[in-house]
Structure formats: structure tokens, C-alpha cells
Image: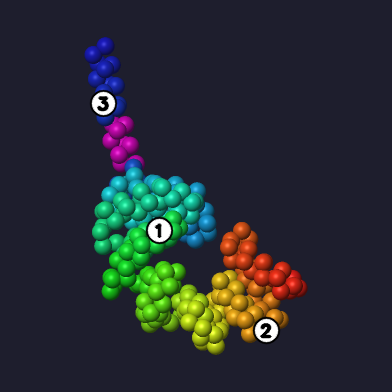
Amino acid sequence: MRKSWIGIIIFSVISCANAKEKDPCKNPEYAKVKKEQVQMDVHRNDLYAALNNILEAKRCNPKDPEVYYWLSKIYLFRQEIGKSKENIELAIQYNPKYSDANLLRGDIYLVENNLEEALKSYQKASSDDLFREAYIAWNDIGWIFLLQDKLPEAENALNRSMALNSGFCNPHTNLGELRSKQKKYPEAVKELQQAIQLCPYLPRAHRLLGLEYNRQGKTKEACSEFNQALRNATPESDEAKSSSQYLKLLNCSSQK
């Protein structure tokens, strides 16, 4: 009997040792590969695979801030805002200087229409001189100031964004709307045309340009822009609904 128990204990110890040897987390490259897979999963909109892969990376390193960044991003795409906020706070807790995380936290607050907290997060991200995507943060800062009708501050932020990345179309779109608010309509058209040249499928730029053409009495051109906006927008989005309303208002013919 004693020999049987000794045999069981030895077998259990060997089994545990083999299990540890087989644990892929023992390979330092495993978690890195999993995170790379997550990026590809998100790119092709396979959020189920992305979540599985990032949870496996989390199992290997539960204090990795990048893990929580991707968890937050995945939950944001899934419109699970509570979980997204919880994970982005953990990402920043483990790395307070994580600029990507501050940028994403701003996006989360923007979804909640919490402009003040979104602005703070974007400003933290933009203050990092080594942050490659600071131009995105500056554009978002400009967008918030635009919503708040703080036009000089908005213009300054948008110009900073364009200075950092001349090929980024969003600040041109925002600057087009800003020029329209300033009643500088020819300049608004110029900025919106530049945005469309950089990003031909940007619904908001087409819709805003349609508004400018309509203001000028160029109904045919306005209809064309509203049709472009509707064609490129997500069906249930505000851009699609607004463009559809203008198409009906102007009695535009539908373009496939």
C-alpha cells in the first residue's frame, strides 16, 4: 500500500513538471506572438479571436500594460464601455507614461460625451514628444475645442496636427468646419477638398462639402457630395442619416 502511494506521488510530481515544461508561457516569445496576432485579428475585425489571444497573453504576463490596452480596445469595439474603461485604467496604472493608452482613454471618454476628461487624456498623449501618433491627439484636441466653439484654440491644435503629419486628412476636415463657422466659406471649401483628396472615402468631409456647395447654390455638386457621403458612411451612422435627409431635401437623384 505504501509503495502504491509513493508511486502516485512520484507520478503526480512528474506530471506537474511535464505540464510546466509544456506551458507555452515559459517561452518569452509566446506572449509577444500572441499580441501580434491580436493586432491582425483586430485589423480583420475578428474580435472573438482577438479576445482569446490577448487573454492568453494576459495569462503569461498579468502586469503587462499592453495587454490591458488591447483588452480595452477590443471591449470598446464591442461597445462594452465599462470593461473598456476598467482595462485602460489598468494599462495606465502599470505604465503612467503610456501615450497610446491615454489616447485610447480619450476616445472612451469621447464616446461617453465627457469632453473635459477626453481633453485631459488627449493633452497627456500630445505632451509626449516621442509619441508617433501625437498628431492624432492634437487633431482630437482641436475637435473638442471646435465642439466647444473655442475656435482659436481649435485652429492652433489642428495646425499642430497637420505640422506633425501633412498626410492626415482629419484636421483638414475639422479646419473646414472651423472656417465655415468663421464664415470663411471659400477657405472651408479648400480645406474640405484637401481632406477628400487625402481620404476620398471620408463621409464627413463629403457631407460638409455638400453643405458648402448648397450654400453657394450649387445643387448638383451638393447632391454629388451627399451621395458620396451616404455611400461611404456606415448605414446607421449620423453621417448617413444627415446625408440622406439632405438628399431628400434637395430632391437629389440617387447615385449607386
Label 1 belongs to which residue? 114
The image shows a total of numbered marks equal to 3
Q: Label 3 crowding class (10 Å Cα cut-off): few <14, some 14-19, many 20+? A: few
**Dominant secondary structure, magenta:** helix
Nearest to the observer: residue 198 or residue 59: 198
Identify the mark nearer the N-term, 3 or 2.
Answer: 3
CA distance separating discs 1 and 3: 60 Å
Identify the mark nearer the N-term, 1 or 2.
Answer: 1
Residue 29: quarter of image: bottom left
On screen, residue 187 above or below 58: below
On screen, residue 76 above or below 242: above
* Residue 151 placement (x, y as % from top left): 41, 77
Q: Is residue 186 left or right of residue 158?
A: right
Q: How is the image coloured?
A: rainbow
* Residue 103 placement (x, y as % from top left): 36, 63
Identify the mark nearer the N-term, 1 or 3.
Answer: 3
Q: Which residues are magenta?
A: 14-22
* Residue 215 placement (x, y as % from top left): 62, 81
Label 2 belongs to which residue? 218
Q: Is residue 76 visible?
A: yes
Give the secondary structure at mark 1.
loop
The disc label shown at residue 183, or none: none
Residue in the picture at 55% in, 88% down? 186
Query: Quarter of the image containing the C terminus?
Result: bottom right
Front disc: 3 or 2: 2
Label 3 is placed on what type of residue? Ile
CA distance separating discs 1 and 2: 37 Å
